[in-house]
Image (tube, coloured by chain):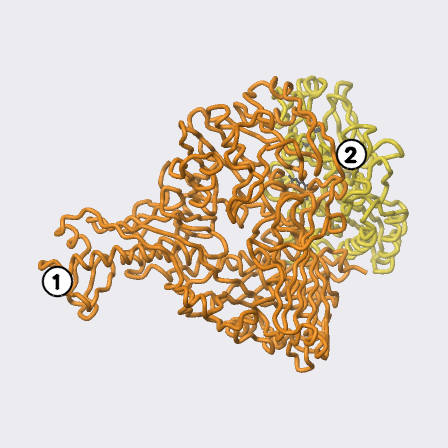
Amino acid sequence: MNLFDYIRPATLPEAIAAGARPGASYLAGGTALLDLMKIGVAHPGQVVDISRLPGLDRIERLDDGAIRIGALVRNADLARDPGFAAACPAVAEALLSGASAQVRNAATLAGNLMQHTRCAYFQDPHSACNRRNAGAGCDAIGGETRGHAVLGWSDACIATHPSDFAVPLVALDAVVEIAGPDGPRDMPLADFYALPDATTPGGVTLAPGELITALRLPPEAAGFAANARYVKLRERTSFAFALVSAAAMLRIEDDRIAAARVALGGVAARPWRSSAAEAALIGATPGTDIFETAADLMVKGAAASGDNGFKIALARRITTRALTLAAAGTPARMPALPASVFAPVTGTASHA
Amino acid sequence: MPDPMNPAASGHHVRLGSNSGQPMTRRDGAAKVTGTATYAADNRPEGLVHAVFAGASIARGRVTFLDVAAARAHPGVIEIMTPDNRPPLHVNPDEKFHAFAWRTEALQDDTVRYAGQPIAVVIADTLEAATEGARLLAPLYASDPARIGFDQGTRYDPPAVGIGAEADFAKGDLAAGLSAAAQVTETRITTPLQYHNAMEPHAIVAEWTEDRLTLDTPNQAIVMSRNAFAQYFDIPAENVTLRSPYLGGGFGSKAIIVGPQLLAILAARMVQRPVKLVLRRDQMFGPVQHRGATQQVVRLGMEATGRLTALDHHATASTSSFDDFIEPAANASHNLYASPSIRTRHTGVRIDTGTPGSMRAPGEASGSAALECAMDEAAEALGLDPLEFRLRNYAETDPASGKRFSAKALRDCYAQAAARFGWADRPLAPGQMRDEDGLLVGWGMGTCLFPAPMFPARARAVLRADGTAVVETAGADMGQGAWTALAQIAADGVGLPIDKVVFHSGSSDQPDGGVAGGSAHTASAGGALHAAGGDAIRQLAEIAAADPDSPLFGTGNTGVTARDGRLYRSDDDSRSDSYSDIMVRAGLTELTGTGSGARDPANEERRAMFSHGAVFAEVKIDPELFQIRVTRMVGAFAAGRIINPHLATSQLTGGMIWGLSFALHEEGVHDLRTGRAMNADLAGYHVPVNADAPSVEAILVDETDPYVNALGIKGVGEIGITGTVGAIANAVWHATGKRVSSFPIHIDALMG
Ligand SMILES: Cc1cc2nc3c(=O)[nH]c(=O)nc-3n(C[C@H](O)[C@H](O)[C@H](O)COP(=O)(O)OP(=O)(O)OC[C@H]3O[C@@H](n4cnc5c(N)ncnc54)[C@H](O)[C@@H]3O)c2cc1C
Ligand code: SF4
């Protein structure tokens, strides 16, 4: 690990000033950043510890019904917050399906959203990686690509975004609140994760000094609470990143779908939505046929970026599954294995 | 160092007079959970500095440049060791100077033989400075293409497999067996590179005092390694003290001396300070052994009645480009099923990885995986229940040697595990069972087998006039419970309750406890401890018999029994004398006995010695997404005398979970172009979590083995893996109708 200055600002302006210096990195829970520093992928000259900044650890219900979550709210605290979990059960389920209890206790909202791809070539400082080193090339292509993207990738980068949390958030039109040297700005979370193009690898770009202060869920987000699920496919029952995952949220009125939100995780550099898929669902009676139609639309244009063509079929199937589960209703209690395909439809703990 | 192993009496576990057989909890448990157990890396001698090795990022070639100046300029860096300045070693690290010596990489030259190989060592005041110094070396290479994977490696016929085992074996006429067969099945299985990944990484603290060397390093063969270290540095063995009171797992990777240990000792010599070197997790994917990958083909010929006529098992296994350790997978087919003809063969493939080594059930694990899958496929071909098929091929004598077994309660294992599991209700055809949530359900089984070797081991028992005893052997507790089980045996050996016995273990100052490997430690070191106790008691009895003041005076040939600190006349329980009275009257403060663990060579000659077992597994599989979960495993094992049922059960269930890990999770992924390990951490190299093993049960089946050794002990450490891998794969078939051809079983293998 390189030598670095450790700075612990007392206020947001001090943090922004410190973070704007070249080579500075913000430190929140540290579960991602420290790993990257230890494996030689991140070498910040200044580590700016924002974990004790005041006022960023609140979960608030705004007057218009929106929910605002501070950047430092711990993943575990958010998932277990009764008001939040009731309003956005799929988000809570996604959070609880991620990492381990210990990591979730330390990990923060902003750190989770900002986490880097788990692409093994990104994590290997000896491999060429456009994300780490613009223009260097992409050693993942032609390498071990089982977990890589099947949607929205380019020859510049085939990485996926690993966050579970971000998947239902993107589906719910969450907005990121950013503070920086030039003042605050808002950005839809979906746009926050740029897809690669022919030459640039995509990912998150914040200007020097910019940091996430909060995340806002619009008032309509809570309208899906009755029919909201997240499903995550992985080869280990827990403590594994998604091979593919899906968030599905429905508003059902008079037995028909009045509003639908669907997003796929593990397939692209951002949680993947399809306006066509959501439009197809609207007005339909919930059922396998329409769910399969929507699932086909979700993976429209998908293509293998390596030895991962099987993920396309899985993405389609998990979309159908998530929609089916969502239509069956949000379980009264969080399943003992959140987001697991082994959690029964009803959410009771028969497989725990 | 505190001695958490011998706290004030904790005798509530003990039933008087009998220590062995009791389910004592681990005596080191409290020390471990309170953090007072001192692992190697916890040692911080005065003046300690830190060493970190730089690992090669290419798999083959030469190092042409190291930026030593940049590393040296980093604050805190003390010294850089490279092939140019490393102090001499007395033994060439490329020499195999004894059976357990591997060719190692200790900066003997600038060649690179695999990715992750040490190419320089940076010594610094802090771990961080040494780590950054190693990064700053920014090596340049002249590299050759990496040869990774079976297709790129070079095939050869190995002269031996494992550690000195035969590479080829034949019994009977295979061709005749195959042509006489009503059915022949062929099963192809590949298994990946697997890395031991003990929770505790390899670590060493090395300190020189003149020509005396003190080493704190986890080790599974303490005295053997002490002797080897002494040879490398050309000093008398007694000048080396190797302390290894606790190992955070070994699994075979900590029995053999590896390059990084030698480098730390060299570094300590170079800077004249104590040096600590602890491998990072990613550094454990290279220089500290692994399980070689295998490609196996098993051909079975059967009569229509289900009797085997031929068993042909060919294993191809990977090894390094510069040393030979061929996973002896095909040898797993020697001793299990009665076939008139058996042939096993091995082919080696040289690839650019570190050298493999023994990894928990080396050969048995991967070989059993293929054999048990093949047996299942054969049962299917015959339309027979898999258990019935195995019973029809039950070996009453060892198929390879024809010898009788020392004991074999495998039928009981089958019966008890099958009953407990509910196997009788299993539909024969696959794809018949669903659970209430629509998941596919499958049941599979496999037979478990593991040899019962013994290693030479010695021990000392000292009776003290205060009625206590000190017993010692250099045993190795890797978490399996040697501190507890060996102490139980030792206490029985001296006829004392365990709280009157101080047990010293885990240091080369003690008598050689042998190798904690081959599932032989309890039998070997335990046998030595029991014999040492017996020797001390024999001397005590002689003193008492000759002492007119003793109630045992004149006992002579009638003999005595030692129990709870007293000797009793064997023919008259009312005449007894306490150890302390006998010793005080004789003016003795101490009385020393010695012993060794051994097996009667005549029994070895006449009997085949194995632990046996059977594992039944249930899997549930999502019918569309194909995620697999092993919802239930039941195993039953017959392994002779069980010293501690609590510990034995935990070894067996742990082995079964390892089998689950083999079947569904573990896989060292290397980039085929560069040879680098691409999942060199525990986020990427998966082992099961609790949720993957919700129900695992091991039944201990009664078995008395009068031949295996004096105490009748066989091993339980490795057998649980065997049988389990196949049982899970067979359950996957039973759920889905799909035969898998490679481990771990991935979701995509079941799709389509
Ligand atoms: C073994 C393991 C398994 C995991 N499994 C999963 C999983 O299954 N699913 C999943 O979703 N995640 C998983 N994770 C990732 C985990 O969610 C992240 O490590 C965690 O959320 C990061 O949060 P943190 O607060 O610790 O971030 P840090 O490590 O402190 O920071 C991470 C990044 O965010 C930046 N950052 C932090 N705060 C801000 C801010 N306010 N504004 C701008 N930038 C900021 C940092 O500079 C850094 O680049 C896993 C992690 C580990 C170690
Ligand atoms: S896929 Fe993207 S992150 Fe991975 S190596 Fe290529 S450019 Fe880097």
* Chain B on-screen colour: orange
Tell me which residue sits at (40%, 27%) in the image: B210
Is residue A171 in view?
no
**Mark 2 crowd level (few <14, some 14–19, many ≥20, 10 Å Cα):** many
Q: Position of residue B451 (x, y in %)?
A: 51, 62
A55 or B664, which lies in front?
B664
Q: CA distance from mark 2 to mark 1?
A: 94 Å
Quadrant position of the C terminus of chain B in the picture: bottom right
B219 or A268, which lies in front?
B219
SS for dot 1: loop
* Chain A on-screen colour: yellow
Q: Tell me which amino acid carries mark 1.
A: Phe
Position of residue B365 relative to residue B300, above or below, is above
Q: Note whether ligand 1 is within 8 Å of mark 2.
A: no
Q: Nearer the viewer, mark 2 or mark 1?
A: 1
Q: Position of residue B235 (x, y in %)?
A: 42, 34
A58 or B66, which lies in front?
B66
Please say if the residues under marks 2 and 1 sit with CB atoms less than 8 Å apart: no
Q: Left or right: A139 with respect to A93?
A: right
Q: Position of residue B72 (x, y in %)?
A: 60, 19
Residue to which mark 2 is pinned = A175
